[in-house]
Image (tube, grey):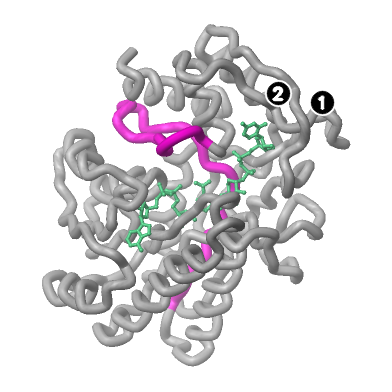
Amino acid sequence: MNVLVTGGAGYIGSHTVVELLNAGYGVVVVDDLSNAKADVIDRIETITGKRPAFYEMDCKDKDGLRKVFSEHKIDAIIHFAAFKAVGESVRKPLEYYRNNLDSAMTMLEVMEEFGCKKFVFSSSATVYGPNNPHPYKEDMKAIESSSPYGWTKVMIERILTDYVTAHPDFCAVLLRYFNPIGSHDSGLLGDDPNGIPNNLMPYIARVAAGQLEKLTIFGGDYPTPDGTCQRDYLHVVDLAVGHLRALEYAKDHEGVEAVNLGTGNGVSVLELVHAFEKANNMKLPYVIGPRRDGDLPAFWADAEKAKKLFGWEATHTVEDMCRSAWEFAKKSAGK
Ligand code: NAD
Ligand code: WQD
């Protein structure tokens, strides 16, 4: 089976490509490198001994995608390609709507031309919006978001759902990720954002590497056991494996399914900081600062549907996540 992975040079995409190659899939990567480096493809080859076909290409380029589909028989798509910075999306909504929506729709149009009917989509826990109680379950009704980025996920879920209504022999799996962190064991792949990281684990890793002075914890007065926010952190390799299970499901099914990929556990910011210190035997300088606008106090997944439908569940511990994140950060910082 040949899988086209858009955004396959990115953080989650590259880890998924490794798992696909190791499992014997043929892999074609399309990535415009707007948020990734070309050497990720070399690193994937170093890890797996196999090199995926790679097109440096924008997913909004319809003729370009037609060329890819003409040169390879594509059986399924995993669509990671998107802009993903929540704060930036508030400042640049049009760029986010254009890139994320147009990429997904162009892909669907080209898939239709070439008779490809399996679509695995990178959605997000953000689609549960600010008002649903946790743990989040897939059948919760109020699907909304509090940022343009999040709305692109809500809208693409809608587009795929309507597309399936019109084409009942199509299969779309909407994977709602919680908070992926950590890295491949090789230390060759990981989350390495440009500039100052917005997300917690890359920020912690830069503090640990001495590239940033200290972590500011956003808020210590939330109604949670230790006053800091709780999230469902999951190891990126577990998340990558979740995509293989979703593909196997899509092979034999039609219709649309939304599925959470999370551990089902809430971990606070302070717990994660202390787990990182323990796993890597170091002290992390931190201060408790004011709350960050838009943060929810706590949420995590109800992870039962993924178990039932795909036979998938997360296996890595928080300690594994912290150890591997540091291995990658150390290598990236040349330590
Ligand atoms: P990432 O930025 O590392 O990967 C996205 C990749 O897509 C990048 O390599 C980028 O160069 C590429 N890309 C962007 N627009 C493109 C376009 N128009 N054409 C071709 N390539 C394009 O991000 P990630 O963390 O690996 O996230 C992957 C997907 O998962 C995204 O859709 C993101 O919204 C979603 N997601 C991420 C998280 C998270 O916490 N990382 C959580 C939930 C959902
Ligand atoms: C985690 C916790 C912060 C940085 C975002 C998106 C979400 C999804 C995953 C894509 C929060 C705290 C953070 C720092 C801190 N992405 N924090 N100091 O906000 O849960 O989710 O990424 O779909 O849509 O919103 O992740 O890593 O930014 O924050 O205290 O310097 O860490 O307040 O409680 P978040 P995050």
Q: Which of 96 and 306 is in front in this view?
A: 96
The kind of residue on which mark 1 rests is Asp
Across and down, in percent, residue 333 comes to 35, 20
Q: Give the range drawn in magenta.
A: 171-197
User: Where does the C terminus fall, quadrant-wise?
Assistant: top left
Name the residue at the front extreme. Answer: 91
Confirm whether the magenta stretch covers residue 251: no
Residue 168, above or below 320: below
Do the CB atoms of the residues marked 1 and 2 lie less than 8 Å apart?
yes
- The residue located at (23%, 64%) in the rendering is 2
View quadrant of ligand 2: top right
Q: In this view, does 1 lie to the left or right of 209?
A: left
- The residue located at (24%, 48%) in the rendering is 21
Disc 2 crowd, CA 10 A, few/some/many (<14, 14-19, 20+): some
Residue ID for mark 1: 226
Is residue 252 shown to the viewer in this render?
no
Across and down, in percent, residue 76 comes to 32, 69
Confirm whether the magenta stretch covers residue 193: yes
- The residue located at (18%, 55%) in the rendering is 54
